[in-house]
Image: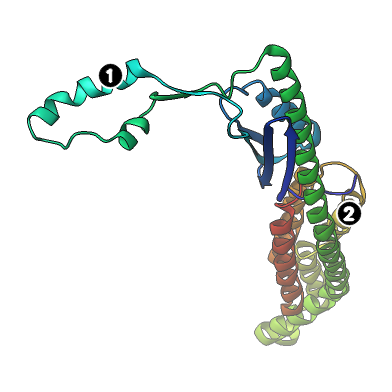
Amino acid sequence: MPISGMTGFGRADGVLGAWSWAVEARSVNGRTLEIRFRWPPGFEGLERVAREGAQARFQRGQVTAGLQAKRAEGVGQVRVNIEQLERYLAAGAAYVEAGRTAPPNLDGLLALRGVIESDDAALDPEAQADLESAMAATIGAALDALALARGEEGAALLGVLAAQVDRIGQLTVQAGDLAAAQPAAIKARFESRMRELAGEAVSEDRIIQEAAALAVKADVREELDRLAGHVNAARELLASDGAVGRRLDFLTQEFMREANTLCSKSASGALTAVGLDLKAVIEQFREQVQNVE
């Protein structure tokens, strides 16, 4: 598949009998694949489904999925746990008798943990298996929707990244044209300086020899060749399938290394300016690459 982003959102809903539920899945950038899944009590077995589903679809990013489920009101039975209620009353009796608090009311007592019990979650094994199977399918649908959203982000990123790679290629060609004029410019500057210092006493051979040594130090042909090679490699990665974010990130480091060397070897203001433009575009490219799976 084409390149994918790492940011997105997906949702899917499901219904079975008296139960209804919704699954939401979202993801953000991450160097590795991290998966978090939240589920209601009684459905712990679905964590493996969510984890394996995410691992099958994604290679990088922080993925968070959550399942919210409810049973139709009136289906389950509700009862008051008298023993628990009596414990609460006994624990607070001394405070009431001492006048330190008002007598409890019914609404407050019924809201205490464990006083109201419901068997909504009580299902026979076969019904529980059917329900979890249906929920698992919804988890898969939500993850599919998330994958689609990440793919759409990747499609948008592709155009931006391709344009930046093209710009890097153009600046590399421009730098090559400027670099070709460096030896002559170095010789002219060196000769002018030597004439100022030594007059006509300096020989042409000495000027050529010293200027050649300076030109060798300022030679950037290897850096330009490597930049051109990195441009071709970046285009191949953008045209390939699968997760290429890490390789693009590494390639960005190589781009910047060559641009830095180009600037340090530059013997002209024009070439330095192009080198700085290169570094700016490479940095923009690096920022966008962080969004690629």
- Amino acid, disc 2: Gly
Quarter of the rendering occupied by the C terminus = top right
Q: Is residue 249 above or below residue 196?
A: above
On the image, the x and y values in percent for residue 127 come to 72, 18
For the residue pair 277 and 146, the one nearer the viewer reads as 146
User: What residue appears at the point 88 percent right and 52 percent down from the top-left corner?
Assistant: 238
Q: Is residue 87 above or below residue 111?
A: above
- Amino acid, disc 1: Glu
Mark 2 vs mark 1, foreground winner is 1
Distance, label 2 to label 1, CA atoms, is 80 Å
Residue 283 occupies which quadrant of the picture?
Answer: bottom right
For the residue pair 107 and 157, the one nearer the viewer reads as 107
Quarter of the rendering occupied by the N terminus = top right
Determine crowd level at label 1: few under 14, some 14-19, many 20+ residues with C-alpha closer than 10 A: few
User: What residue appears at the point 13 percent right and 29 percent down from the top-left corner?
Assistant: 95
Q: Is residue 128 above or below residue 260?
A: above
Please tell me which of labels 2 and 1 falls first in the chain: 1
Q: Which residue is mark 2?
A: 229
Determine crowd level at label 2: few under 14, some 14-19, many 20+ residues with C-alpha closer than 10 A: few
Q: Is residue 32 among what the camera can see?
A: no
Judged left or right of residue 83, residue 189 is: right
Q: Which residue is mark 1?
A: 86
Q: Residue furthest top?
A: 125
Element type at mark 2: helix
Element type at mark 1: helix
For the residue pair 92 and 270, the one nearer the viewer reads as 92
On the image, the x and y values in percent for residue 137 come to 79, 31
On the image, the x and y values in percent for residue 168 come to 82, 65
Residue 152 occupies which quadrant of the picture?
Answer: bottom right
On the image, the x and y values in percent for residue 58 come to 77, 37
Number of numbered tags placed on the structure image: 2
